[in-house]
Image (tube, rainbow, N blue to C red):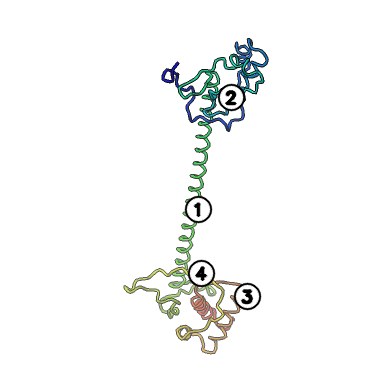
Amino acid sequence: MTEANLPPPLVPADVDLRSFEYMKIDVRRLLTSETWMLGTGDECKAALTLWLESWHQVPAGSLPDNEQMLAHLSQCSTWKKSRTHALRGWVKCSDGRLYHPVIAEKVRDAWQYKLAQKARTEAARLARQQQRRLQAARDYVTDNVTERVTDSVTESVTDNVTDSVTESKGDKRILRTEEQPPLPPLRGGPATGSNGKHRRRQRQPQTPCPDDFALTPDMLKFATDLGVPAERIHPETERFISHHAAKGNVFADWPQAWANWMRKAVEIGWQQR
């Protein structure tokens, strides 16, 4: 039979089962086959050895059409005598290699299993990757929403305290209004834009009282306009610094905190301090 008339390979050329350590064998089918029942011990041993060796050839399930290689792979000391029976069922195909229909059937089944397992592994990897991306996105959104809500609440509370503070004194309620002197300007510039509208202040980190905290002319004027006696301004400032240092308090704007302290001192009254 010429090369052109040979049948096509029974297994695709890219089938590689060298990572598969085990070959599935139908015990009953093997033991009742003519190859097994009609062969001698050496012949059956050589036949079975060639089946097993073909499993890790490329393509899987094939053997080289070379007498020296076949004798070596069969591990048979009587190869010339056992050759015909050992190669029972093997056919030469158009790629120049030998194939056995039964072994080729087992190879195709194992190859389909390998491809399916590879697809499952890849799908699981992509699912884990997608899960990590979704978790990262959720964490990013959570962090940003939390930061924005915190900023909004902080600014709202600061604006409300600055604009209107209601405190209790005995059975009377004292409402703070525009009649009170304005707070000293915050560090970093005015709180209004060029069009006169309120501008949202940039969030500042909260820190302990700075070592160089000192009263500015604007702060002294604020305290005087508020009604703080001149001789009480510096002692009350010392009290303010000592109190918050002992408590370990932190503020984003210490001049603002000082102004609130002074207002509180005026409202409570010096006789109670």
Q: Which of marks 1 and 3 is nearer the N terminus?
A: 1
Residue linked to disc 1: 139
Residue 33's spot in the image, x, y percent?
60, 12
Report the residue marked by disc 3: 246
Q: Which residue occupies the foreground of this view, 225 or 246? A: 246
Helix, strand or loop at label 1? It is helix
Q: Alpha carbon of mark 1 to alpha carbon of mark 4: how far?
A: 22 Å
Q: Earlier in the sequence, mark 1 or mark 2?
A: 2
Q: Residue at x 57, y 29 (%)?
A: 56
> Is disc 3 surrounded by few (<14), some (14 to 19) or many (20+) residues within 10 Å?
few
The residue at which mark 2 appears reads as: 68
- Distance Cα–Cα, label 1 vs label 2: 66 Å
Which residue shows up at 55% across the image and 82% down it?
A: 237
Q: Which x, y percent locates residue 210?
A: 55, 78
- Note whether 173 is above or below 107 in the view shown: below
| Distance between mark 4 and mark 2 Cα atoms | 83 Å
Which is closer to the viewer, label 1 or label 2?
Answer: 2
Would you identify the image quadrant in which residue 74 lies? top right
